[in-house]
Amino acid sequence: MRKPDLTDLRNAFGTFLTGVTVVTTREKGGIPRGFTANSFTSVSLDPPILLMCVDKTAESFRVFTESPGFAVNILAEEQIETSGLFASKRPDKFEITGWTESLTGYPLLNGSCAWFDCRRSQVIDAGDHVIILGEILSFDYNDKIGLGYMRGGYLRLGLEQSALKAASASADVIVGAIVEYEGKLLLINDAETGELTVPASGMSGEPGSLSKLHRILSNLGIEISISSLFAVFEHEQSGQQFIYYRAKASTDLSGSDFWSPEEIPWRRIKSTATHTMLQRYISESECGRYGVYFGGHRDGAVRTLTE
C-alpha cells in the first residue's frame, strides 16, 4: 500500500469542521501549561469521558502525559486571539490571559463557552500522537457560540450565517479574499485593462465558492489560511452577493503581485468596493482590531470581531 502524501492527507483532514479548544495542566512545580487543540471529542456519557490528542514533538508532551489531570476549555467565537496565543511558543500566555483554577487546580480560561475538569485515566500510543483519555470530574457551559476551524482557517459561525444566507439566496455569488503576506496585500492584474483587483471566484458568471477561490490561488502558487469573514454585501442594482474573507498566505510568493500599503497604485483599482475594503483592512491592521462589514455596496455597518 502506497504511503499517502502528508500534505494531501493534512488537507483532507482539514475539510472536517471542528471546534477549537485550549487544553491546560500544570507542571510538577505548579507552572501552568497549555496548548491549542482541535483534536478533542466526547467519548462517553456514563461514565463521563472525553479525549484529546497531543503531538509527540510538542514541548508540553511530557507534561501532559505525566500530569494526573488536565482541563479542556472550548473557545468561544471571539477568542481567535486566545487560540493563536496558545498555539504559539510565547512564555507569558497565562500572564496576559484571564483565568481561574478548577477544583483540581488546572487553568480555566475566562470567556470560554464550556470547560471540563478531568482526571487523566489512560494514555494510548497513536503514531506521531498520543491519545489521552480524561474522566470528567466537573464541567460548566454557557450560551456562547463556539469558535470553528476548517481548511486552516477560523470560522465564526454566528457571523458566517449571513454569508451562508447570501450564498443560498442567489446563484450570482462572488467569493473573494483580502490576502496578506508579511504586511503586503495581493492584487491581481488584469492583463487587458491594467486594473488591479483582489482575488475572487465567480467573476466569470459561475457561482463563486471558497473552494474555487482556493483553486484560483493555488494555480498562482499561493496557499492561504482563512482568518475570518471581512465583508458581506449586496449590489443593490445587480443583486450580486459578495462575500470576502481575510486570509494569510503561507507559501513561496516569488513572482506574485503583493504590494505594501504605501506602494499600492490606487488609481488602478477601479472598484469602489475593493478600494474601500483595502483601505479598511489597512486601517484595521494598524490597530489589530478587525471587523466584518454587512450591508449594501454603498451603505452598511462594520461589526467588530470582539463584539
Image (spheres, rainbow, N blue to C red):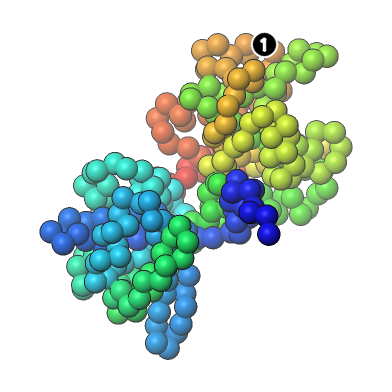
Q: Residue furthest front?
A: 1
Residue 7 in sight: yes
Left/right placement of residue 300 relative to residue 98 reads right
Residue 247 image position (x, y, % from top left): 57, 36
Residue 47 image position (x, y, % from top left): 39, 87
Residue 52 found in image quarter? bottom left
As displayed, is residue 221 above or below residue 103?
above
Q: Residue at x 68, y 59 (%)?
A: 1
Q: Secondary structure at mark 1?
A: helix
Q: Amino acid at mark 1?
A: Arg
Residue 272 in sight: no
Q: Quickly name the residue at label 1.
A: 267
As displayed, is residue 166 above or below residue 176?
below
The image shows a total of numbered marks equal to 1
Q: Residue at x 54, y 33 (%)?
A: 250
Residue 233 found in image quarter? top right
Q: Residue furthest left?
A: 29
Pick the front one: 221 or 94: 221
Residue 147 image position (x, y, % from top left): 49, 56
Residue 115 found in image quarter? bottom left
Q: Residues within 10 Å of mark 1 (few under 14, many from 20)?
A: few
Left/right placement of residue 245 relative to residue 173 reads left
Q: Residue at x 72, y 18 (%)?
A: 189
Q: Residue at x 85, y 33 (%)?
A: 204
Q: Residue furthest right?
A: 205
Pick the front one: 16 or 276: 16
Residue 11 image position (x, y, % from top left): 62, 49
As displayed, is residue 182 above or below residue 81?
above
